[in-house]
Structure formats: C-alpha cells, structure tokens
Image (tube, rainbow, N blue to C red):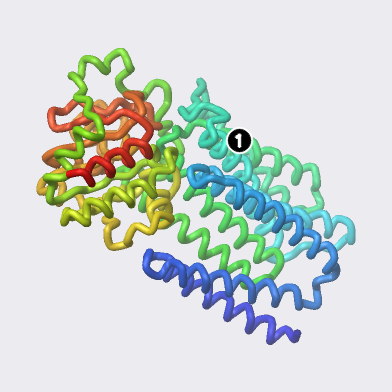
Amino acid sequence: MTPTLIQSAYLVAAILFILGLRNLSSPKTAVTGNFQAAVGMLIAIVATLADASVVSYGVIMAGIVVGALAGSVLALRIEMTAMPQMVALLNGFGGAASALVASAEIFGSDTTGTTLEGIVPIAIVISVLIGSITLTGSLVAFSKLQELIGGAAIRYPGQQFVNGALGLSMLGVAALVVMNTGNLDAFYALVGISLVLGVVLVIPIGGADMPVVISLLNSCSGIAACATGFVLDNSTLVVSGSLVGASGLILTQIMCVAMNRSIGNVIFGAFGSAGQTGKSSGEVQEQGNVISYTAEDAAVIFSSAQTVIVVPGYGMAVAQAQHAVRDLTDTLGEKGIDVKFAIHPVAGRMPGHMNVLLAEADVPYDQLIEMDEINPLFPETDVALVIGANDVVNPSARDDKGSPIYGMPILNVDSAEHVFVIKRSMNPGFAGIQNPLFFKDNTMMIFGDAKKVVMSLAEAVRKY
C-alpha cells in the first residue's frame, strides 16, 4: 500500500472517529456512533498493518490473539456492576501501552545509536509520564472500587508537600531526558517517579469522587496515546488520542459542575476522608424516626398515583434490579401512570453508569430525564421511588452548610408528595454521609434486596 493510500485511509478513519463521537452523544444514535468508530478503528489497523515499516507480523498477530483472548474472557465474566472497575483497568492498560511504545523508542535509539530529534523526545517524555501516572492511578481506582482497599480518602501529614516534591522532581528528570534521551538512569527515574505519583495522587481521593477520577484518567490515557502518535508519526493515533483526551476532559468538567466542584478540588480536596464523613451512625437516631413500609403497603400508594419518578442508583446495579424495574414501570404504565427516570450526572460509580444499566433492560430513552429537566417536576409528582441511591438525593447538599457535599446539585426527590426508598439498611452511601431524606415525614423506607423488593412491588401493584 502506497504512503498516499495509507494517509487517505487514516483520514477516513479520523472522519469516522469524529462522526462516531458525535453520535455517541445521544442514546438514540449511540449504537450507530459505536459502529462508525469501530469501522474507523478497523480501517486504521488495516492501514497500519499494510505500512512497509511493519517488520514482524508474527509478533503482531501473537499480540492480537493474546489480547483478544484476555479481552473476551474479561468481557464474558465481568458483571455490569463491575463495569466501573473494568473501565478503570482499561484506562490503566491504555496508559501502560502508550508508555511502553514510547519507551521502546528510547531503547531502540540507544541500541542503534540513532539520535531522537525534533518533537520526538518531548512526545516520548509526555507519553511515559502521563501513561505511567494513568497506569498506577487507575490501579488504585480499581482497588478502591473493587473494595480491595478502603474507599475513603487516605491522608497523612505533609501529603501535599510530598506530592509537590514528587511533581517537581518528575519535571526536573523529564527535562534531563528531553535534553539527552540516552540518559537511561534519568529515564528510569522518570518512570519510577511517575508510577509513584499516580498512586499518591489517587489515594487521597474519596469514593464519592471516583466517577470524576475515572473520567479524568480516561482523558489522560487519550493524551498519552496522542503523544505516542507524535512519537510514531502516526496521524490516526494523534487524532484518536486527541478525541479521547478532549472528550474525557469535557466530561470531567461536566461532572465537576454537577458536583459544584473544581477539578483541583476533586484531586486535592480529599472529599470523603475520615474526617469528612458527616454524621456518625451514633447520631442517626437524633434525626428522627424512620417509617418502614412493605412492598405490599407501598403498592396501595403506587396504584393510586398518576405520576412516578424512579431514581436509580448503585444499589440497583448491585442487585441487578434493572430488569425488575423495567417490569414494574411497564406495569405502572399499563395502569395509565406516567413514569419517568431521573438521571443524576454522577449516579453510580462511573459516567453514564445508570444509562448503561437501563439501556440493558430496554428502558425507552425518552423516559430518561437529566437532572436539570426533572427537578422542576418533583413538586408535581405523586411518588418518587429511590432505588439504592444515596448521595445524589441527599438534601444536606442543599440545606446543610456544614455538610461535606454542600453545594452539590442533587435530585430534589423530597419535594415529591410521597418518597419510597429501597435500601438494604440505614448505612450511609459510598461517600459515608448520612441522608436526612430517610427521616422526613413523606419518606417511607422499604428495606431489602432491591431486585426482590421491586419484583414484590410489581406483583402487588398488579393486584390492585
């Protein structure tokens, strides 16, 4: 394949990436967008393999086979509730791949005695630096989400000083590598400091901020890939990496706005640390009494309602209750009850988590309403059904200036005439903050597994 044909193929691939990204912005066109992006990637891969600079197809095929097998096993075994962990790992692997490819250029030039010139040394350093931080940062995020380590922020005296010293050291060593790519000692130091920095930057971030962290690390993996594209002089990698990096940053900013926080505050604010966990369990009883209902009791109110808003949360994902929820809402719809879903931007543990789960259950897209559009409807709503959500419906974010989440936009479910909350227990959510909503007079708690409760509720509603 001639260089002109290869570059033309890259151009087509880049156009498909952009079209795919555009269509992925809407649930109605997301499938088409995904297909367009996949076709673009296939074209880019074929064009790359046809490049005369490829010297070993055997190694490439071996890598494809190993990667495909590993990916297939993970895709088949992973549960929907573990998708945030999966995304975190994929971000880390993406960063590691970029760093390894860029590192290979360093070692290759050292072996052949060639000199890396122009923008290449800078691109190598950026790729290794960001890729290494993304790798270890993503592994820490995975460990927190998988509960291998605690989800709370980990703080220690002098933490900011240590982070700052590491950051300055990394920049100094990076400058040495740029000036002399043959200085392997400096290169090893750059890799080591970057790996450590990835760990120390993420461990102070609490579990409630993990959706933002995952989005930010996704952006970092894209930036690392973009830098690697400059190292390899591959325009498709530059374009695709730029798109991932930019879209990840935009999504991160959107999520920060949804939490009324800045990116800097997320990274350095340590929200969710032990010292900011809000009211302890011992103070829970001081907030009032909890009204406990059964599914059969709740069915009476549901059957007499005209409007219902369902608020899904991570608890729905854990219980795999999305199909049961779809069955319940279909039953309510058959009785002429208007049903909508309220989607908070940071509900669940990764961006778009609730949308993915509800799409899996074939919930119609037009029933999924974003926070800004659904909030004015709560005062006119007969029943709000909260399923496993905690922090995104916590009125403390609106009413309590002493709360760690004060200022974070929430779903105003407490404005509905009746509020039903399905939870396993009164334990706080992932942020470790108790929720006064549970003690309000118009709130009824239904304790139990979300899937079983929703199934019982649907069955009881059918009888009325």
Comparing 393 with 451, the one in front is: 451
> Does residue 360 appear left or right of residue 385 in this picture?
right
- Residue type at mark 1: give it: Leu
From the viewer's perspective, is residue 103 above or below residue 430?
Answer: below
Give the camera-side residue of 62 and 403: 62
Residue to which mark 1 is pinned: 166
Tell which residue pokes out farthest to the top in this image: 282
Q: Is residue 277 left or right of residue 68?
A: left
- Locate residue 443, reporting x and y percent: 18, 32
The answer to whether residue 98 is visible is yes
**Could you tell me residue 105's position as x and y percent?**
78, 59
Left/right placement of residue 18 relative to residue 135 reads left
Quarter of the figure with the N terminus:
bottom right
Residue under the point 39% across and 21% down: 275
Q: Where is 4 relative to 386, above or below?
A: below
Residue sitting at the far front: 463
Asked if one can make out residue 401 in the rendered structure from this viewpoint, the answer is no
SS label for mark 1:
helix
Instruction: Estimate the x, y position of residue 126 in percent, counting from the top left.
Output: 63, 54
- Rendering coords of residue 244 (x, y %): 52, 61
Pick the residue in front: 369 or 119.
369
Q: How many marks?
A: 1
- The quarter of the displayed image where residue 438 is located: top left
State which quarter of the image contains the C terminus.
Answer: top left
